[in-house]
Image: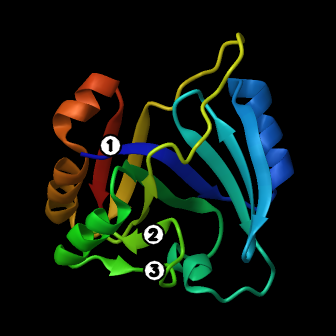
Amino acid sequence: MGRIVHLSLKVEEVEKTGEFYKSVFGFQDAETKKTRDHVSRHMTDGEIDFTLMKYDAGTQSAESKAAGDGPCIHHFAIEVEDVAAATAQIKSHGCEIISDPGVMPVKFRAPGGTLAELVPVGRYIRATGQHKIDRIVHLALKVDEIERTGDFTRRSLGSETQRRRKRAITCHAT
């Protein structure tokens, strides 16, 4: 069973947005890097990798266009023990693979139309230090197939895991 370990926002200003989350909520910086056609500023609330990303001007990659234009929740990541097996499982549910073959993590369009990705255990850095960090506790997704999406997230994440972690996912129909 997987668990959500990452949430990525597509933003217009990585630096300014990151400083807001750092100063207001105490999120800690983990890493800023350039990957393929975007810059990512990885931050953490101690449990979840919270990433701010900005695509290069003019990029036309499938990943850059998958969530639409403008700022948005771009995707979330589910940590799994076996990425290949999980990829086969999501394909069996009719999910479209968005990332290029062989690219890690594996981005896919989940039931309901949202983007998600599969990552191996231990991919993201957890916070260290003593200062207070506010926690991310809820993720709401706008979806086009609420029943199918709900079934998929229950199978992928398990309602028991959601209760134990005191985090929630809510799906809203479009």
Mark 1 vs 3: CB contact within 8 A: no
Assess disc 3: are there few (<14), some (14-19) or many (≥20) residues with their C-alpha within 10 Å of its C-alpha: some
Task: Judge by depth and name the residue closer to the eye, 82 or 27.
Answer: 82
Residue 83 location (% of width, % of height): 37, 62
In this rendering, which labeled residue sits more in front, label 1 or label 3?
3
Residue 6 location (% of width, % of height): 51, 47
**Mark closer to the chain start, 1 or 3:** 3
Secondary structure of the residue carrying tag 2 is strand
Residue type at tag 2: Val
Mark 2 vs 1: CB contact within 8 A: no
Q: Which residue is mark 1?
A: 169
Secondary structure of the residue carrying tag 3 is loop
**Residue that sits furthest to the top in the current view:** 130
Alpha carbon distance from label 2 to label 1:
21 Å
Q: Which residue is mark 2?
A: 106
Q: Where residue 7 is drawn, which disc sits there? A: none
Residue type at tag 3: Ile
Query: Which image quarter: residue 53?
Result: bottom right
Task: Judge by depth and name the residue closer to the eye, 107 or 172.
Answer: 107
Q: Is residue 161 left or right of residue 26?
A: left
Say which residue appears at 76% left-offset and 46% top-offset: 31
Alpha carbon distance from label 1 to label 3:
22 Å
Query: Which image quarter: residue 59?
Result: bottom right
Residue 111 location (% of width, % of height): 26, 69
Assess disc 1: are there few (<14), some (14-19) or many (≥20) residues with their C-alpha within 10 Å of its C-alpha: some
**Mark closer to the chain start, 2 or 1:** 2
Q: Where residue 98 is drawn, which disc sits there? A: 3
Residue 21 visible in the snapshot:
no
Assess disc 2: are there few (<14), some (14-19) or many (≥20) residues with their C-alpha within 10 Å of its C-alpha: many
